Image (spheres, rainbow, N blue to C red):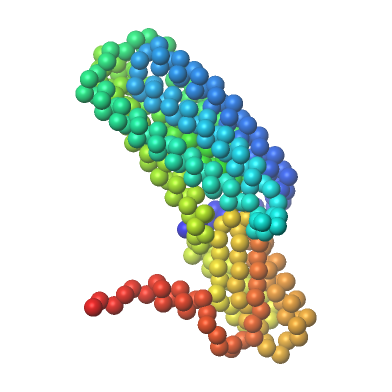
Amino acid sequence: MISDATLDPARRAGQPTLDAESNAALRNVASIASMCVALVLVGVKVWAWSATGSISMLSSAADALVDVVASVVTFTGVRYAAQPADREHRYGHGKGEAVAAFVQAILLAGAALGLGAQSIVRLVTPVELEALSLGIWVVIGSTVTAAALVAVQTYVVKRTRSTAIAADRAHYMTDIAVNFGVLAALALDHVFGWTRSDSIGALLISAYMLWNARDMANESLAQLLDSELTDETREKIRATVLDCDRVQGMHDLRTRYGGDRVFVDFHVEVDGTLSVHDGHAVCDAVEQAVAELFPKADVTAHLEPTGLDDERLDEQVARNDRPAKPH
């Protein structure tokens, strides 16, 4: 399920949130900065790998190369997701960010598997490394650069809740962890002469990259497959609806996270003697109340008279969730 982070504490506290244009500008700046940093890091690390022959440095360089491709994907996904609704995409383009995040997860997993296989080969037949001091200083500089970018991306994700930027940040947090692994491997070889420490470090780095790819894929798939928001968030929505004036009940609540906004729809029950005009006013008030729970939301309420006997989604879901009886 989607994290409860989709609820905005600042909004609930009455504090202003950034408007759509400011959010788009922040995402653009973060994606451009990511591409620039990735290009620099991949060049430096490939050079360091060629000088040292370190397989752990190659792992770090490959991760940086994946970052370059992922940053391009993020850059494209962010711009696509920012487009307004059109004739062919009336719900908007918010899932473009989730697609970008899923592509990044695939790239990271592919690199991790390839490097893992290479690490095993090097573990069996270790190779003596060269220019270890150069490699150590390259890793230190790369770590500082990546940490600065992660700080910027953390701010952007906090303000915009961008799925693609969050996935890109995960890449660079992985890169920082990778750098520490490389630094440890090179230091052990340099100080103690443990030649296999390089291949062991690379193997651990590959496993860590694969784990991060799994988390990224799960988060993006939850959005692409229209997973419900958390039970806690759904209960907040339900309580908000039932607290509205002249609302006598509600059912068939459905929620999903669409990248740039939350989509919520439900049936609201009112006195069947209300006029169409009054019923419409109740729906407007309910939709507004629910929308204020989120930074950006698309809320649709369907009006029904209390006591209407019809097939409900809640009943269908309950039947589907019921465990099958043993034969």
Q: Which residue lies at the image location 50% right of the left edge and 76% below the top edge?
A: 314
**Residue 136 makes an appearance in the image:** no
Does residue 276 sit above or below 87 in this rendering? below
Which image quarter: residue 270?
bottom right
> Residue at coordinates 40% horizontally, 14% vertically from top-left?
50
Residue 112 at what x, y percent from top left? Answer: 37, 34
Q: Residue furthest top?
A: 131
Horizontal arrangement in the rendering, residue 137 relative to residue 195 (left or right): right
> Is residue 50 among the parts visible in the rendering?
yes
86 in relation to 48, above or below? below
Q: Count the marks: how many?
A: 0
Which residue is at the front of the view, 232 or 42? 42
Q: Quadrant of the C terminus?
A: bottom left
Task: Classify residue 265 as left or right of residue 201.
Answer: right
19 and 8: which one is in front? 19
Residue occupying the point 32% across, 13% down = 129
Quadrant of residue 157 within the rendered picture: top right
Report whether 23 appears left or right of 205.
Answer: right
The location of residue 107, given as percent across then percent down, is 45, 37
Q: Residue furthest right?
A: 277
Tell me residue 204's x, y (percent): 32, 32
Q: Is residue 182 above or below residue 251?
A: above
Q: Residue at x 40, y 11 (%)?
A: 51
As drawn, the residue found furthest toward the left would be 124
Q: Please provide percent x and percent y for residue 283.
A: 70, 74
In the image: residue 136, left or right of residue 73: left
143, above or below 113, in the image: above
